[in-house]
Image (cartoon, rainbow, N blue to C red):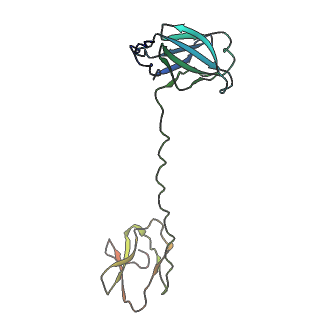
Amino acid sequence: VVQASAPYDSPLAPSTVTAERDASKDVALSWNAVPNARGYSVERSLDGTNYETIAEHLTETAYLDTPSVRSANAWYKINSINGEGTGTSATVASIVGTANPTTFLAPIAPPTPAPIAPSTPAPTPCLAGDLVVEITTDNYPMETTWTMTNMCDSAVVGSGGTYSESGTTYTKTMCADDGVEFEFTINDSYGDGICCSY
């Protein structure tokens, strides 16, 4: 007995399958042509699990499924066939009420989860003590500013102003380390001071 070698390989699976509902709610299927395929068949499932062949020996790369799916969801697989075997596409779904096409292009990796940003730590409590500054504004609060400076390293540890409300007390609390001297400077941009009727 002499057995001849097959002149071709089994066909690949169709890699682009589209299922689109038309105006009548029929499902228009289309797919890419597969080299070495002698024909195509279409399988359909109405429950997403059990498939039946609904078309065979197709030479075109399109098929219109009608009318049994007009009011039902449907899932499809397209098979490319030749004498050496079958290539089966991944499943493509057509859901009732969707006008846009559903397209299978290729298996898609699950999305990479977004990195979780580290949570902002709670503020460190002031262990030494609080330094409280209270400013009561005069009739021109927009002229008033102030700074509190650490005399050991000249770092500004707090500041305030300008302000918007006259005759109002504004309070700012800062952390004061033990053994540190501070310099408080208050400024009046107009230069007439903070007093009395002005």
Foreground of the two, 109 or 146: 109
Foreground of the two, 6 or 76: 6
| 128 over 112 or under it: above or below | below
What is the quadrant of the N terminus in the image? top left
Kindly give the residue lying farthest to the front in the view shown.
1
Foreground of the two, 163 or 36: 36
Foreground of the two, 129 or 185: 129
Kindly give the residue lying farthest to the bottom in the view shown.
179
Q: Residue at x 49, y 18 (%)?
A: 85
Q: How many marks?
A: 0
Viewed as shown, does residue 188 lie left or right of 24? left
Viewed as shown, does residue 108 lie left or right of 180? right
| 155 over 95 or under it: above or below | below
Expressed as whole percent of the image width and height from the top left, the position of residue 133 reads: 46, 80
Viewed as shown, does residue 18 lie left or right of 156? right
Expressed as whole percent of the image width and height from the top left, the position of residue 179 reads: 40, 92
- Residue 3 is drawn in which quadrant? top left
- Residue 74 is drawn in which quadrant? top right
| 122 over 80 or under it: above or below | below
What is the quadrant of the C terminus in the image? bottom left
Q: Residue at x 42, y 16 (%)?
A: 34
Expressed as whole percent of the image width and height from the top left, the position of residue 16 reads: 46, 22
